[in-house]
Image: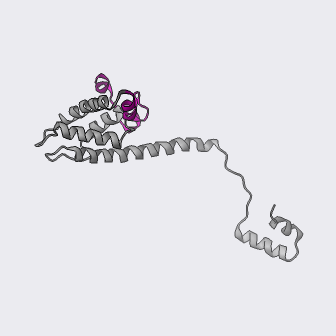
Amino acid sequence: MLYWESIKPKSVIDVFNPELPSIYTINRELGETKLQALMVKWMNSFLRFYSVNGSMDAIQVADTINLIIETYPHYTQEDFKLFFNMAKKGLFGQVFGRMDGEVIMNWLAKYDIHRDTVAQNESIKEADRYKPLSEPMKTQGISYAEYQELKKRADSGDEEAIKMIMPP
């Protein structure tokens, strides 16, 4: 929990180079029970933020956590911290007296789209940085009109035009 309290990702870019492993790796190395216990702590700190008519009971929290583990195994603690902070700011929608697994999973789907879009844009920027390093291919070519003119000259017996339109 100390690490959980200390991380403060500001944007999706901050979650791409995490210091700790994904929840899949945590599950594999520590076991499902320990991962679920960690995620219950994370989820409860998030749920305490909301004052809603019906709060989630332990079974609903456990079901939601299992769905998250199944759907987003590549996420890290930084992802969840950022997601929860963005949700608290209302970036995925307002809470109208209800906070449950469906709301959280819908918000996670929106976060995932946002995360994927940022990742794609960063990948394009990275690729664009290398474009000036490669030289464009130098090809010799002619337009269709120039080809038609060469063809006419070749058909009339022009030796130079015949050589130019012959395949290599």
How many marks on residues? 0
Which quadrant of the figure contains the N terminus? top left
> Horizontal and vertical percent for residue 50?
16, 38
Which quadrant of the figure contains the C terminus? bottom right
Identify the image quadrant of residue 127. top right
> Horizontal and vertical percent for residue 7?
33, 27
Q: Front-most of 50 and 160?
A: 50
Residue farthest left in this picture:
53
**In magenta segment, residue 28:** yes
The colour scheme applied to this rendered structure is: one colour
Q: In the rendered view, does 146 fall on the left or right side of 49? A: right
> Horizontal and vertical percent for residue 161?
84, 69
Picture residue at 59% right of the left edge, 41% below the top: 130
Q: Front-most of 106 and 50?
A: 106
Picture residue at 79% right of the left edge, 73% below the top: 151
Q: Is 164 above or below relative to 67?
A: below
Picture residue at 23% right of the left edge, 47% below the top: 102
Picture residue at 23% right of the left edge, 44% below the top: 101
Identify the image quadrant of residue 158. bottom right
**Stretch of the chain drawn in magenta:** 1-29
Residue farthest top in this picture:
2
Q: In the rendered view, does 5 fall on the left or right side of 55? A: right
Q: Is 60 above or below relative to 34?
A: below
Q: Is 73 above or below relative to 1?
A: below
Q: Front-most of 140 and 74?
A: 74
